[in-house]
Image (cartoon, helix red, strand yellow):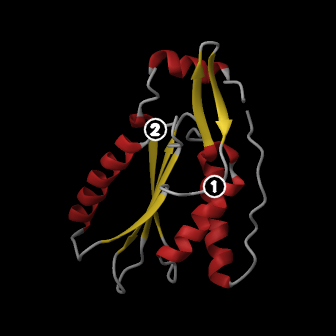
Amino acid sequence: PIPLTPIMHSFLARLPDCAADFADVHTLEAAPGVDAAVARSAVELLIAMHEPLRYRLRRSDLGSYLECAGTDPAGLFDAKALPPLSPEEEQEVIAEDCAVLKADMDPGRGGMLRARFYDRGRSRGGLIVLLVNHFVFDNMSIVVVLDDLDTLLADLLAGRPPAARPRPPQW
């Protein structure tokens, strides 16, 4: 078991169900050549690199704690094709999708991360949307995760072995 930090205890006192609404949404333009398979591989490597993305919130009579699950990304990534839409319509579809994905995030089941790749056709690059529960990454530390994802995508596109070394949690 991994003990909670004081701020995690404070968060649970304010939002006892670890509300999914406490997830940050990051929408990233994918580089040319990034498709759903490349995005999936990068997200799987990202999950393996960052232990907090694998945390599960557990509760017992003695209190709450975290467990680190394996690196199986089942249910954490999917892909969706978008029809030709105006930028406003596209944003609306993605916002509606994110609301559904957030509602399904359950830190007890392993809901610290959700990722979706949006295929926008040949004329436009895809989008990668990451939803990360603020319980494990705040707005400052998420920069490291996003930089790592960018590096993993570049390595995969270039055919290089991905630089996917595990990063220990920093708190």
Nearest to the observer: residue 78 or residue 90: 78
Looking at numbered disc 2 in the image, what kind of residue is underneath it? Asp
In the rendered view, tell whether residue 107 sits above or below residue 125: above
Q: Is residue 82 left or right of residue 154?
A: left
Q: Secondary structure at mark 1?
A: helix
Percent position of residue 26, x then y? 46, 53
> Mark 2 vs mark 1: which is more N-terminal?
1
Could you tell me which residue is drawn at 72 percent across and 29 percent down? 1
Instruction: Work out whether residue 136 can be spotted.
Output: no
Looking at numbered disc 1 in the image, what kind of residue is underneath it? Ile
Q: Is residue 51 left or right of residue 110?
A: right
In the rendered view, tell whether residue 155 sits above or below residue 44: below
In the rendered view, tell whether residue 60 sits above or below residue 105: above
Could you tell me which residue is drawn at 44 percent across and 21 percent down? 15
In the rendered view, tell whether residue 76 sits above or below residue 168: below
Could you tell me which residue is drawn at 65 percent across and 77 percent down? 156
Nearer the viewer's eye, disc 2 or disc 1?
A: 2
Q: Residues within 10 Å of mark 2 (few under 14, many from 20)?
A: some
Instruction: Identify the mark at residue 47; answer none if there is no mark.
Output: 1
Q: Secondary structure at mark 2?
A: loop
Residue tagged 2:
106
Could you tell me which residue is drawn at 50 percent across and 15 percent down? 13
